[in-house]
Image (spheres, rainbow, N blue to C red):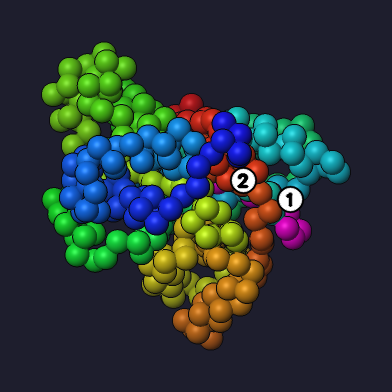
Amino acid sequence: MTAVERQGIDEDDVALIDALHVSPRASFEQLGATLDLSAVTVGRRWRRLTRDGAAWISSAPGPAMPLAGAVVDVTCAAGRVGEVARALAENPRVASVHLTSGSWDLFALVVAQDFAAMSALLVDDLAPTPGVHATRARPIMELFSGAHWRLGAIGPNAAHELSAGRPEHHTLQTAREPDAFDKALYQALQVDGRMSLRDLAKRLGRSEPAVKRRLDHLTRSGMLTFRTDFVRFAGGWHLYVALSLRVPDELLYETGRDIARWPETRVCAAVAGAANLFVTAQLHDLRALEPLLRRIRATSPDIEIADRQIVLRSIKSWGRLLAPDGHAIDVVPVNPWA
């Protein structure tokens, strides 16, 4: 669909997207009651948003899913940045690819089933990519945020109403290795995080009750969660930045958890490297960057902002391939077990 054919996003759409941030698989009836709209209207709006590539929901690993990840900075041979970005975006273990300003041409977020698999991905797969000049990998030690954030379009009472009894709110269980059923369910929900139980059962060759039991188990145990995303330009978020911070070791986890709660924060992770906290943030414009940096410095005088990168274009965002205007145009499902 061309940009001319796409419809815009209005306030009711933003409220719907915010409600789906709170409860990505809530029924249209539940969403309608919260938004004071009919279920038919909510369904029609969501179908339009997904058809236009303006919003989408994907499965994501929960905090109990045993995986390894890294932030990878890449410099490219002259004139080959686009080629490299497209090649990386086609890799199912590369979750996101962003072209940036600064000393590195792009950064990517990668995920694999364990550290050995991630090392093989970095050394044997990504580094030899034609057009890649140099890479720097920063393994993720702890992910503080990356799937959940809010737009503030619905109030706290409405959010509480939607989130009451949501499976993700239950106590995390001991991590275990995902089996074939878990992986197949995760992959199906990568393409459409709101896929119905009936369609999931048909796709996986399982009964609906079996799919429901396993889906409930994965979400309640913290192995599976969901990520709601949208074309951020249309929501007024015109600037995406990546920051590398040097934080004293004794403050690292406290600082990471604090910054992860900020409404601007999209990804916040403790990483292995001289700059040990990686943060991406969505801002309304370039003028909002300095207040964000001042706020970071105010958390502790010992925190140093080692690097800042402005995202010039997002090529892939958690499996979604994006047009230059930020609309989703295709999907390469994130598969840590590929």
**Residue at (36, 64) in percent of width and height:** 152
Label 1: state its secondary structure: loop
The percent coordinates of residue 153 (x first, y second) are: 35, 61
CA–CA distance between discs 2 and 1?
19 Å
Inspect the image, locate mark 1, and give the three-letter code of the amino acid beneath it: Asp
Residue 180 to residue 174: above or below: above
Residue 130 to residue 271: above or below: above
Tell me which segment is drawn in magenta: 101-110
Residue 274 to residue 322: above or below: below
The percent coordinates of residue 205 (x first, y second) are: 26, 13
**Image quadrant containing the N terminus:** top right
Q: Is residue 191 visible?
A: yes
Circle number at residue 105:
1
**Residue at (66, 49) in percent of width and height:** 313
**Residue at (56, 35) in percent of width and height:** 5
Circle number at residue 325:
2
Inspect the image, locate mark 2, and give the three-letter code of the amino acid beneath it: Asp
Q: Residues within 10 Å of mark 2 (few under 14, many from 20)?
A: few
The reply to whether the magenta stretch includes residue 201 is no
Q: In this image, 80 relative to 201: left or right?
A: right
Q: In this image, 291 relative to 38: left or right?
A: right
The percent coordinates of residue 330 (x first, y second) are: 54, 30
Dot 2 or dot 1: first in sequence order is 1
